[in-house]
Image (cartoon, rainbow, N blue to C red):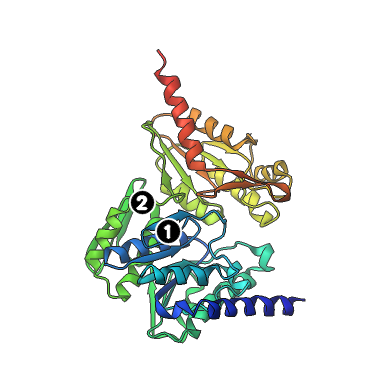
Amino acid sequence: MELLYSIYHFALAMFGAFLYGYPSQKILLIGVTGTKGKTSTVEMLSAILEEAGYTTAVLNSIRIKIAADSTSNEMRMSMPGRFYIQRFLSKALRAQCSAAIIEMTSEGARQYRHRGVALDALIFTNLAPEHIESHGSYEKYADAKFELGLQLARSSKRPRIIVANAQDAQSTRYLALPVEEKISYSLKDTPHVSSETGGRFTFDGVDIAMSLPGEFSLQNALAATTLARALGVKTETIARALEHMKDIPGRAQHIDEGQDFTVIVDYAHTPDSLKALYDAYANSRKICVLGATGGGRDAWKRPVLGKIAEEYCAEIILTDEDPYDENPTGIVLALASGMSKPPTIIMDRREAIACALSLAKTGDAVLITGKGTDPCICGPKGTKTPWSDAQITREELEKIKMVNSIP
């Protein structure tokens, strides 16, 4: 059965490439893979290439962009199948895009969605435990990710470029690929400084400043910078593009309705990404809203996320996220099992966010994690409730403003 499954998806991918006339052969195509940072790196690289004069197409978990046309990605997947990628690239060509940047996932590789895609370059950001139950083991998850590196090696394009994060143990595997250019990057070896309001790093002797918070933002920027430079983009152009980036939706997104405390919406849903976000706001009293993304998957990380939240946050509110067919209360209690003290549990996500905002004082940071730009809450039997953490947060902040304005 597994063999038939593989043959089916492989044939589907190859037929899609044929059906649309092999569009990936006719455009500069860059893939970005890793456990964390894919979406932000794609966005940063697109901004850099546009600053350099390219017309870009973008396919990631936030949006589908073709030239000036950008729409939200409502599919809850960054690497869709059923010919979607080939159709996307074909549309990009018709819109006269000169570069396409796509987020590439292990789940997509399992279903051969990367086949029939001729890459010019691939960025590997990092690897951390995720989708373990789906893949069967961490090793199988790593192998599925690396299949995307092998796809770069299969590409008939020249030169092929691999850019890999030297701080990740898996990078040696990627940097051993038989391609023309192999480039590593390491924030650890790059002069840098980060804070809650932004950061800066030095590249090719040029100081590159950003308004995006935390070291993780600098990591992603360094990845995008390294590849852009390999493509011949001037460092001064890169610096200008990154300096102009003010926000990435759902990725340490600052929600400002005039309040005197910080409010952040972020997709963080792994132990490492949660720690990275909390570290970015180390100097603030943190009020944290979190759940555990995806009922029926990666149950191992639930108590781990709870433990991390207790270590970093002054106030914790556990809430519903995407239970699918699993008991949502059971998911939240699994999170709480990693804590030494009983947390506040508010299953209604809007009420949880409202409560967190009501607890905030001047200078605090309210960190709302897990969903980012996800457009819905997924419940039992395929039900989907339209949702936006950012919009709900704005609405609740407006309510607080109205109450405070009453004499």
Q: Residue at 50% x, 28% y: name it.
A: 358
Left or right: 214, with 136 as reference point: left
Residue bearing the label numbered 2: 212
Please give the name of the residue rendered at 46% of the width and 67% of the height, measured from the top-left corner: 102
The image quadrant where one finds the C terminus is: top left
Residue type at tag 2: Leu
Q: Is residue 199 above or below residue 260?
A: below
Residue 11 in which image quadrant: bottom right
Rendered position, 35 above or below 313: below
Nearer the N terminus, badge 1 or badge 2? 1
Percent x, y for residue 58? 43, 63
Q: Residue at x 48, y 36 (%)?
A: 393
Mark on residue 40? 1
| Residue nearest the viewer, comparing 240 with 281 | 240
x, y percentage for residue 152?
48, 80
Lateral position of residue 12 relative to residue 46, left or right:
right
Near mark 1 (Cα within 10 A), the count class, few <14, some 14-19 or many ≥20, is many
Q: Quadrant of the N terminus?
A: bottom right
Q: Distance from label 1 to label 2 (Cα)?
A: 10 Å
Q: As shown in the figure, which amino acid type bears the numbered disc 1?
A: Ser
Q: Percent from the top left, x then y, of residue 224?
A: 37, 66
Quick check: can you spot residue 312?
no
